[in-house]
């Protein structure tokens, strides 16, 4: 049988339980504020205004279109060169297959260069570093 003087029958009075919940809520609120402050310090400043946000989205779409067109162009040029090689030499489909693979590799290299993740061919990583 549950005790009628205690709300949940656990032996704690309603007032003591409420006081403990208030302390926990204050502690959680303090921790939430600390977390928000640390996250705000770590994240870069957001652009203010709707026009700036739209411009940032358009820049992202432009960069995606540029990268995808560079990849597709590499593949198309490789396939075209392989197809022409096959027609001239008479070795279908091997020239087309090799051209496709070379075009795929060239497309990936173009994307990496354009994104700034790979340096131009033949350049050193650190210009101050002496040649070996």
Image (cartoon, grey):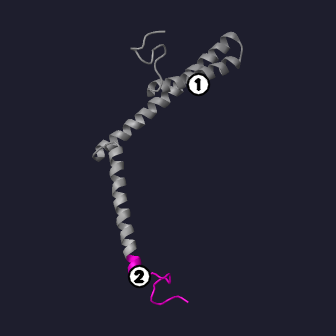
Q: Which residue lies under the disc numbered 1?
A: 104
Say whether residue 121 is left or right of residue 53. right
Q: Position of residue 54 (x, y in %)?
A: 34, 43
Q: In the image shown, does 50 or 5 lie closer to the viewer?
A: 5
The correct choice, above or below, for 23 with respect to 59 in the image is below
Alpha-carbon span between mark 1 and mark 2 = 71 Å
Say whether residue 85 is left or right of residue 13. right
Q: Mark 1 or 2, which is nearer the eye?
A: 2
Q: Quadrant of residue 43?
A: top left
Local SS, label 2: helix
Task: Tell me what residue is drawn at x 37 percent, y 38 percent.
Answer: 58
Task: Tell me what residue is drawn at x 44 percent, y 18 percent.
Answer: 125
Q: Position of residue 21 (x, y in %)?
A: 39, 72
Secondary structure mostly seen in the magenta stretch: loop
Q: Position of residue 42 (x, y in %)?
A: 35, 44
Say whether residue 41 is left or right of residue 93. left
The correct choice, above or below, for 124 with respect to 38 in the image is above
Q: If you read the primary sequence from the N terminus, does the residue marked by circle 1 or circle 2 appear first? A: 2
Tag 1: Cα neighbours inside 10 Å, few (<14), some, or many (≥20)?
many
9 in the magenta segment: yes
Asked if marks 1 and 2 touch (Cβ < 8 Å), the reply is: no
Tag 2: Cα neighbours inside 10 Å, few (<14), some, or many (≥20)?
few
Q: Which residues are magenta?
A: 1-18
Q: In the image shown, does 74 or 20 lie closer to the viewer?
A: 20
- Residue 31 numbered mark, or none: none
Q: Position of residue 103 (x, y in %)?
A: 58, 22
The correct choice, above or below, for 130 with respect to 110 in the image is above
Q: Which residue lies under the disc numbered 2?
A: 14
Task: Tell me what residue is drawn at x 46 percent, y 9 percent.
Answer: 131
Q: In the image shown, does 9 or 123 lie closer to the viewer?
A: 9
Task: Tell me what residue is drawn at x 35 percent, y 49 percent.
Answer: 38
């Amino acid at each position: 049988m549950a005790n009628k003087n205690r709300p949940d029958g656990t032996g704690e009075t309603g007032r003591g339980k409420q006081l403990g919940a208030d302390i926990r809520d204050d502690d959680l609120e303090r921790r939430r504020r600390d977390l928000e402050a640390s996250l705000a310090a770590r994240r870069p400043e957001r652009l203010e205004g709707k026009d700036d946000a739209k411009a940032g989205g358009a820049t992202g779409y432009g960069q995606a279109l540029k990268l995808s067109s560079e990849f597709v162009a590499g593949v198309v040029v490789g396939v075209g060169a392989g197809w022409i090689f096959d027609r001239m030499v008479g070795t279908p489909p091997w020239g087309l297959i090799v051209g496709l693979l070379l075009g795929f590799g060239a497309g990936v290299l173009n994307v990496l260069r354009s994104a700034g993740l790979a340096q131009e061919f033949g350049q050193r990583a650190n210009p101050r570093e002496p040649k070996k």
